[in-house]
Image: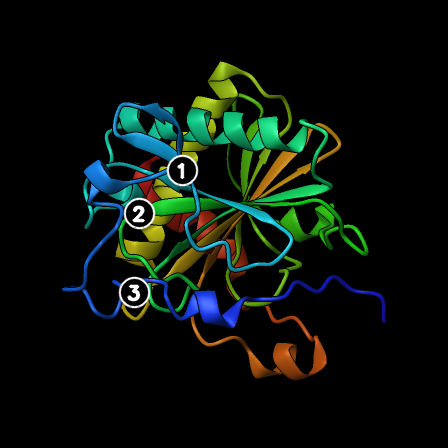
Amino acid sequence: MNHNLLEFDMALGRQKPETIVHTDHYCPFCDRENLENIIDSDGSILLVRNKYNVLKGTDQFVLIEGDACHSDMPEYTTEHMRKLIRFGIQHWRQLLHCGKYQEVLFFKNFGPLSGGTIRHPHMQLIAIPNLSVAIAVSPEEFDGPVIYAQNNVTMTVSDQPRIGFWEFNLIVRKLTDQSLDTLADYLQIVTDYLTHHFHKRCNSYNIFFYHRDKTIYVKLMPRFATPPVFVGYGIRVRPTNYETIAEEFHNLYGK
């Protein structure tokens, strides 16, 4: 099987701080006076080179979303959320088009089941010079009933999920200031839904960004234990009531 494989530096990984479970531990993103390798900033938003470059052969960056450690996207002002997404998309696209990398991963981990280690809200960029095969993603994984559509941005719930159960998608077909602001607004709506209205046991989610054929795709996944039929057999699972989710969003956030 031809697949992509990155090596994780275990010695370096053991040095990484952890503040999701151990909330009283030192948070390096709060200690702004001692942050190193700051690449760019916009107010309280910072892009820094990752001090713990644990994936060998890659360049890793951290986008620190603000200076409030125990906040997250649902609590941001509309202005801050839009500024954050414009800043993140700009730097992601610069890395994608700089000529040094075959692929640049742009994603967010939130919560103990997301794969993250730092509670302070942040996103990550992992720039990869060489891959064995292209990143496995298909447009069909973003198809499904439409929840909202405005300014060339569409929000859907997957009818062909990438892994299983609930997966929410944002599709940006034309990149403009207006569509970026709508993308930010929709991201804020979905993260609010996942953390406040979705399921009482949902305390984690991921956001993944993809760029294909002049279209930006974004997938938001609430994180629970991964379905065993997917882990063992690659069989995807979807909920029987996925088609009714639009009504719930409209009741909560308007049409």
Residue, x 35% and y 55% (percent of image)? 194
Please identify the quadrant where the C terminus is shown.
Answer: top left
Q: Nearer the viewer, residue 35 or 202?
A: 35
Residue on which disc 3 sits: 18
Front position among marks 3 and 2: 3
| Above/below status of 207 relative to 235 | above
The quadrant holding residue 176 is top right
Is residue 255 visible to the viewer in this orientation of the structure?
Answer: no
Find the distance from the CA under tag 1 to the CA under tag 2.
14 Å
Could you tell me the amino acid type at mark 1?
Val
| Residue 156 figure quarter | top right
Query: Which residue in the rendered view is the most extreme toward the right?
Result: 1
Q: Residues within 10 Å of mark 3 (few under 14, many from 20)?
A: some
Give the number of callouts: 3
Q: Position of residue 17 (x, y in %)?
A: 30, 62
Residue that appears at 40% across and 71% down:
14
Q: Residue 116 bears which disc, if any?
A: none
Q: Give the camera-side residue of 99 and 64.
A: 99
Report whether 37 appears left or right of 210.
Answer: left
| Residue holding disc 1 | 48
Q: Is residue 190 above or below residue 159?
A: above
Counting residues from the N terminus, which is met first, the one under dot 1 or under dot 2? Answer: 1
Q: Is residue 117 visible?
A: yes
Label located before the other in sequence (3 or 1): 3
Which residue is at 27% across, 42% downward?
Answer: 74
Q: Mark 1 or 2, which is nearer the eye?
A: 1
